[in-house]
Amino acid sequence: MEDGRITRLPGAARAPRRRSGAGGYLFLAIPLALYAVFFLLPNLSALYNSLFEWNGIADVRRFVGLDNFRRMFADDVFRRAFGNTVKYTVTLVVFQTLIGFLLAVLIYRASRVNNLFRTIYFLPAMMSAVTVGLIWGFIYDPNMGALNEFLRAVGLGALRRSWLSDEKIVIYAIAAVHVWVGIGYSVVLFVAGLQNIPQDLLESASIDGASAWKRLTRITVPLLRPTTLIVVVLTTIGGFKSFDFVYVMTGGGATHSSEVLSTLLYKEAYAYSDFGYSAAVSVALLAIVTVITLIQMRCLREKN
Amino acid sequence: MKAIRKVPRYAVLILFALLILFPVYMVVMGSFKSEFELYDNIFGLPAKIGFGNYVKAFVEGNLREYYRNSLIVTGCSLAASLALSSMAAFALTRLKLRGRRAIYLLFVIGIAVPTQVGVIQLALQMSRMHLTNSLLGLILIYVSYELPFSVFVFYGFMQDIPWEIQEAAVIDGCTPFQLYSRIILPLSRSAVATVAIFNLVEIWNDMLFPLVLISKESLRTLPYGLLQFRGQYASQYTVIFAGVILITLPLVVLYLCMQKQFIRGLTQGAVKG
């Protein structure tokens, strides 16, 4: 994604000679104030409130130390939500990476037709999670939904099921929708990575008699490691954060079978008025995402 | 021979293209069908093109009102976000302010924080500030939440603008604000495009903030309004489909006109995680 940027020009690194006056801070005053009040403060309150028991209304909140976290580890619903989040994330990462890579290998050379396919694959990224959730809610509908109708029409009627109320598959069904929306991102990232691989390397390997498969596995895949890492990390974080698709399609049901961390923290607050516990779940989510981000930064630094 | 080898390649590409396009086709066709026709003939073309579902969504479903709210919120947030984030990045890159590195870090840390973490606390805080059920409240939040990524993009771009240009302008008597508005901002057009596109798609499509901040029906924005509308029209999918098209069409048209910029802006935004 470098094409829009000018590279560092000579002299760009040199600092200005004069220090501008305090007036310079005026440019920062409004953005910093908004950021502090509406972004930093609520996130810090989440950390703080995770140490309290509070119903969200009462004036008094009771300090409970780390009790909310202790309770979390023993809570079956939390465990279930965590397990579902992992299943969801793994599904998302595996399919988005593999399909994204496959499609990118097929269309990375710039041509009219390839651009058309790229445009199509990226199209769902324009859609709101609400509209996507409503559309797939219809497709998955057990009675008149398009998927079951399609299966019946092609003679696979035995595979028909209630996709969103079958406890065993609901979480995968929702993850599939996320793949549908996100596939364009991984295609575009892989295409950019593939375009950076020197063509003469592949050509000389081809002259030396390496088969297409060998070129792919011995040259392309190893050289794509940084791109693959970025795709894997982005989809992992996306998976852990996912809220909208689950909220719109099932709300976490039936009986928590599609509950994920972010729907749980929403429910603990609004359905059960357990704001301290909700804050603790959100801190757990933040911790997980922070660890993944740190791993990503570490890997990217090693690459340089 | 070569033509035959191409067959599996196109088979794969077309298969996945159909997986994307078929649901879209179904929604477009469904939005013109009657409820009975939808279930009688899910995959076919509508018997006749009628806009009844659209009228119903727009008028009875109140999408007209939600449209106005979404336009106000998205438009104001977008303008404020562009102005404030470019000003902040300008101050952080082009003026030698004390502590600018720390302030920049404070902003970009926000990129890694998932929105869901603070959203409940934010809702409580907004209600204490009497900013729930208010479009202004939504705008303030969108601007604040888009700052980390927007500042990050402008910062990356502005720090590479050559100092010679700035020095010449300062010698000519440019004030810092003129430097920002006449020189640095116009030179950052491609960053403006990236930030604008990313913010536009995120804000227009957002459901989470209205979900926790707006309870008044007349103040709903489009995606959240359509979601509530499902409850109201239960299984009237034809009307819901018309609503889906009304929400999605503006962005899809823009996307088809400016694919390159959209793909670049959104992919950069995805790095936001």
Image (cartoon, coloured by chain):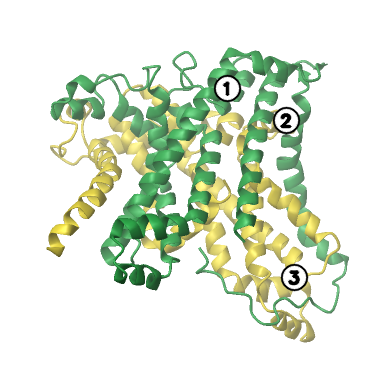
Answer above or below: position of B3 versus A100: below
Q: Residue at x 40, y 16 (%)?
A: A167
Q: Chain of mark 1?
A: A
Q: Which residue type does callout 1 highlight? A: Leu
Say if residue A261 shows up in the picture: yes
Q: Identify the disc placed on residue A264.
A: 1
Looking at the rendering, which quadrant does residue B180 occupy?
A: bottom right
Horizontal relation, residue A225 to residue B128: left or right = left
Q: Estimate the x, y position of residue A64 in percent, counting from the top left.
A: 80, 16
Marks 1, 3: nearer the viewer: 1
> How many residues crowd around disc 2 within 10 Å: few (fewer than 14), some, or many (20 or more)?
many
Answer above or below: position of A186 versus A239: below
Q: Identify the disc placed on residue B94.
A: 3
Q: Colour of chain B?
A: yellow
Between the residue at mark 3 and the residue at mark 2, the CA separation in whole angstroms equals 35 Å
Q: Colour of chain A?
A: green
Say if residue B254 shows up in the picture: no
Q: Secondary structure at mark 2?
A: helix
Q: Chain of mark 3?
A: B
Q: Are marks 2 and 1 in contact (CB under 8 Å)?
A: no
